[in-house]
Amino acid sequence: MSLIEVHDLEVHYPIRSGFWNRVTDEVLAVDGVSLSIEAGETYGLVGESGSGKSTTGKSIVGLEKPTHGQVIYKGKDITKSANRQKLDYNQDVQMIFQDSLSSLNPRKRIEDIIAEPLRNFGKLSKDEEKLRVLQLLDIVGLDADALYKYPHQFSGGQRQRIGVARAVATNPKLIVADEPVSALDLSVQAQVLNFMKKIQRDFNVSYLFISHDLGVVRHMCDNIAIMHRGRIVEMGTRDDIYNHPMHIYTRRLLSAIPETSVAHREEARAKREAVEKEFQENQQRYYDKDGKVLPLLDVTSTHKVALPADEVAKLQREAD
Amino acid sequence: MAQNDPLNKKSSISAEDLTRLSKEAEATATPSSRQIIWKEFKADKIALTSAIIVVGFILFVIIASFFIPAGSYKAVNIMDYFNKPFTPDFWLGADSSGRSVAKLLIVGSRNSIGIAIGLTLISGTFGIAYGLISGYFGGMTDMIMSRIYDFMLMLPTLMFIIVLVTIIQNYNAITLTLILSLFQWMGSSRLIRSRALAESRKDYVAASKTSGTSNFKIIFREIMPNISSLIIVEMTLAFAGNLGVETGLSFLGFGLPNGTPSLGTLIANATDPTNITQYWWTWLFAALEIIVLCLAVSYVGQALRRSADASQRLGDK
């Protein structure tokens, strides 16, 4: 059984306008997302900004109230706050935020920041708590002298590692990492990602890894879902997505990964242009008449794609 | 802690290292807020002088007023009618009833400052809590709470206070403070709400929520410290303003009950043209006191605000 299952999740925001400030329209931030995360795996959620990937993550942690759909954990629907309280849900599901500075309270010392979940979910004595904070700092590669400092005294990478330490503090089963490295420069990105991988090996924690960076996702994730316009356009294993992309949006994202070989510059450019041309010409084939993403259909046992039924049947035959 | 805790196996730090590492951490610790405030006052001599003046003066009037029996500043003595100031018996002269202006000033200052402090504390505490709750929860709660203080703001405050003071037969400094507090909390509440609204959308609040912290704790332990600079400035300015509220009411004759001295009743002497030109000592000292106090309080407030905001600090240089 999966660790956590998301069924048909929808988050719609009302748009109010006019003299009476009535609801005139809705933003479909997340519009029917279903996925399931296994214990110990890293699940990648990829998409452009505004595609609803962060909102999906926040709904799974319980920060956003979905308008429809369920998130099932241990057989309970945790979109209801009563169920979250009963399960001590956030002891098992934690979050790493994108902005490392604003996610750490500027008025609190590092000790108090990392100890906050410990104080709320556990009953540790003062010394045990301090020891645990020191161990957590050690795990993310920070020295003991960080204990009584404030967040603004650290660099971006160090702050993000403090955020990782806080998320790991309660020994969670799942950590939702909302673009954890997109605000960091490349050398620091690798450092933080390696700490996250090490923690996964040591504690057998699952990640829901939200990112727009396909290079990073390839390094981190076992299974990947590509989101566009609030829906999933394609989901599958790393191999499915990177070596057999089917949806035009996935192909566009993949062709946007920068390549650093000068020799193949023209070649890569021609490839990008071909993908873009296909998207411009055949858009109506990949989206329905309102521009919405089509329902997901199985191609193989692991690979799903949002394409018309006849197209999928053709692809299935090719796969066999 | 349980022995099979994965952390114990994965981290090289064990219980034996705790004291050593704690000491290391303390050696490099950032100074506490109290040390920062003290540094800030040491760097700004005007603020330090102001703080000494304000605290010293408040202590002085409170202690000195215990040694002035009520009879000595209430009794009318026609022989000392408008006695000149700077004489051995009357340091600051006497008023039209022959009462010592110095004694009236001390007792009056105690009354006025006491009311201002009480008013600031009561209305400030309520206003800040109201604004924080309104801003944090947002949505419908915010909507209803905002309309309530909009309604309160619309009321003609001065008229209400005057009517209430006239209706209530036996009132004293405490009841007056409570009546004034009813109409003074909205300003700070509105200001705090706007900041709390912005602050509670930040990620650290979301992080606290996922860490299982209760709403009440998030409001008062997470958000409030982050807007403390605003609160300090608001409270010091409110104190200076509240000094004026009671003084103004007493000046109009609706403040403290008749015969109770206050800064306002002393300044009210200046409504008489002969007092202004000839008997200046009856009102000038009270007016000077208010100016000096308000100025000093705002200097103290500025220094406190700078110490709360790392980018404005003078003490670090």
Image (tube, rainbow, N blue to C red):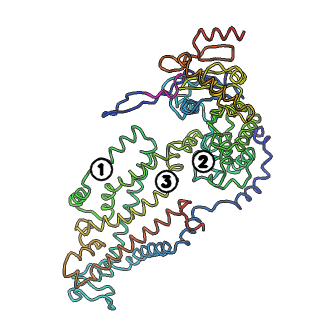
Q: Chain of mark 2?
A: A
> Looking at the picture, which amino acid does disc 3 mark?
Ile
Q: Which residue is mark 2?
A: A101
Q: Was residue B161 drawn as part of the magenta stretch in this picture?
A: no
Identify the image quadrant of residue A6: top right
Dot 3, how many residues are within 10 Å of its Cα: few (below 14), some (14-19), or many (20+)? some
Does any portion of residue B141 appear in the rendered image? yes
Instruction: Give how far across and how far down residue B155 sits, in percent.
Output: 26, 51
Spot the residue most to the bottom: B88
Q: Which residue is mark 3?
A: B227
Spot the residue most to the left: B273
> Looking at the picture, which amino acid does disc 1 mark?
Met
Q: The N terminus of chain B appears in which quarter of the rendering?
A: top right
Helix, strand or loop under label 3: loop
Q: Chain of mark 3?
A: B
Q: Which residues are magenta?
A: A26-32
Q: Is residue A158 above or below residue A300?
A: below
Q: Which residue is mark 1?
A: B152
In the displayed structure image, the side of residue A39 where residue B316 appears, left or right: left
Instruction: Give how far across and how far down residue A188 sits, in percent.
Output: 71, 44
In the displayed structure image, the side of residue A211 where residue B300 appears, left or right: left
Q: Nearer the viewer, mark 2 or mark 3?
A: 2
Dot 2, how many residues are within 10 Å of its Cα: few (below 14), some (14-19), or many (20+)? some
Looking at the image, which is closer to me, A220 or A207? A220
